[in-house]
């Protein structure tokens, strides 16, 4: 049986993230056979040091749009009201997914180490979804598209997760995701089921603190003993690399955060009014920006706005190409064959996102430069599904009719 901390002993939380600064449309530096409008590009400063050329080629194939959603819930003492708001808004959010052609499924974990047996604990273990107030394993750990009574399931599951458990004061969402990836790798855990082949992946973090409370930043410390060193598994860049090492560089994914945004003093004061001091969630914002995900405020009275933002980002991830780096000067050459006319696109983090998904049967060729890290020039030719033509059929038809 897990014991809860008293309210007086739990660490205070504030997670904050940067205001959503995900780039607006970023035009490419070089036009390719009329494909790209580059009239507004800002080339930026040219960095010093050697560079290497990256060549990427991908033929888009028609397939079902598969999306695996991983919900990462902070279950520390101060989080229960925020988590209940999340539960209230997850059902309409997922209903929008239900009404699309996205083949989605969802798993959930928490930001602490969980008991998985009478003698073992584990980071990144999946939670069983709950159909009633009586704990059960009936629904399993993977919630599938088409499941009924979603509103009740989310409410029951958040209540089942609860808040304030022993050890929950050391919130480590990034470490939990890192371990969840490891646990979900079919080479190690064939029965996990949270990650399917050829699926895009969208993480949604909800937390009122940063990684390990203060993100390893002594200047954010409020309570004695609150500062804890970040380990490699807590670092955003390590998580991104681990995900790609596990699932391949072509796997599309985003990390989305519901947090207190850095610099949002009004939200910070509101969270502090509960009696426990809070902290800005810099690391979670950094990871969301790196992966082209959304950043929402935990102080919103209704999380549906945040979740709708994430839905847009999730859909973007289904029509995107992962990049090996942020291209030098933001310059990238794109050629689509056969031509589909002008293509509006943008660079978000380390992803190239097409505002209108490229139809099946087209080949996308990219050329851009990365800082030279000693590797040989890259050339990727593996075909991966970027868009479900069924899901975007109306958009594509409208687009084609313009030309």
Image (tube, helix red, strand yellow):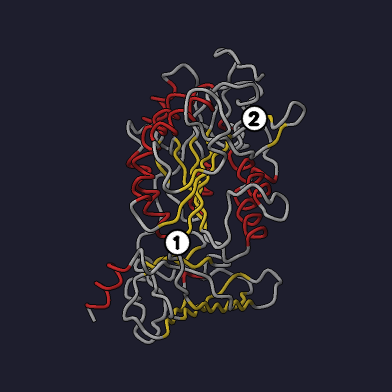
| Residue furthest left in the image | 402
Give the residue number, with chain letter if any, for mark 2.
227
Residue 130 vs residue 284, the one in the foreground? 130
Residue 362, quarter of picture: bottom left
Residue at 67%, 46% (x, y): give it. Answer: 183
Above-or-below relation of 272 to 229: above
x and y, in percent, of residue 94 in the image: 39, 45
Task: Tell me the number on the disc at residue 271.
Answer: none
Residue at 55%, 31% (x, y): give it. Answer: 220
Q: Are marks 1 and 2 in contact (CB under 8 Å)?
A: no
Q: Earlier in the sequence, mark 1 or mark 2?
A: 1
Residue 88 vs residue 366, the one in the foreground? 88
x and y, in percent, of residue 217 in the image: 60, 36
Task: Tell me the number on the disc at residue 65.
Answer: 1
Seen in the image, is 192 located left or right of residue 369?
right
Q: Residues under labels 1 and 2: Cα distance?
A: 42 Å
Residue 343 vs residue 277, the one in the foreground? 343
């Amino acid at each position: 049986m897990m014991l809860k901390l008293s309210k007086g002993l739990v660490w205070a939380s504030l997670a904050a993230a940067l205001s959503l600064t995900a780039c607006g449309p970023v035009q490419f530096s070089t036009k390719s056979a009329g494909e790209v409008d580059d009239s507004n590009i800002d080339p930026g400063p040219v960095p010093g040091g050697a560079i290497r050329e990256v060549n990427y080629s991908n033929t888009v194939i028609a397939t079902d749009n598969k999306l695996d959603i991983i919900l990462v819930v902070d279950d520390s003492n101060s989080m229960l009201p925020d988590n209940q708001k999340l539960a209230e808004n997850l059902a309409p959010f997922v209903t929008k997914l239900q009404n699309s052609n996205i083949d989605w499924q969802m798993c959930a974990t928490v930001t602490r180490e969980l008991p998985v047996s009478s003698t073992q604990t584990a980071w990144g273990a999946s939670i069983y979804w709950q159909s009633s107030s009586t704990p059960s394993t009936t629904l399993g750990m993977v919630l599938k598209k088409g499941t009924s009574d979603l509103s009740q399931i989310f409410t029951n599951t958040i209540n089942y997760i609860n808040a304030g458990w022993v050890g929950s004061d050391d919130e480590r969402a990034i470490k939990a995701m890192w371990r969840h990836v490891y646990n979900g790798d079919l080479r190690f855990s064939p029965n996990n089921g949270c990650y399917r082949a050829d699926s895009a992946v969208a993480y949604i973090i909800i937390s009122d603190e940063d990684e390990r409370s203060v993100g390893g930043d002594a200047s954010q410390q409020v309570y004695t003993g609150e500062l804890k060193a970040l380990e490699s598994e807590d670092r955003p860049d390590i998580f991104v690399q681990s995900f790609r090492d596990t699932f391949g560089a072509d796997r599309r994914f985003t990390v989305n955060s519901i947090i207190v945004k850095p610099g949002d003093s009004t939200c910070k004061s509101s969270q502090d009014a509960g009696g426990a001091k809070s902290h800005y969630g810099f690391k979670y914002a950094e990871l969301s920006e790196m992966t082209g995900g959304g950043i929402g405020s935990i102080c919103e009275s209704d999380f549906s706005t945040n979740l709708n933002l994430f839905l847009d980002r999730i859909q973007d991830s289904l029509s995107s190409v992962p990049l090996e780096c942020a291209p030098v000067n933001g310059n990238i050459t794109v050629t689509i064959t056969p031509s589909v006319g002008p293509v509006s696109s943008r660079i978000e983090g380390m992803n190239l996102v097409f505002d209108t998904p490229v139809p099946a049967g087209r080949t996308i060729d990219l050329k851009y430069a990365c800082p030279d890290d000693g590797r040989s020039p890259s050339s990727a030719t593996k075909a991966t599904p970027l868009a479900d033509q069924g899901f975007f059929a109306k958009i594509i038809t409208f687009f084609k009719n313009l030309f």
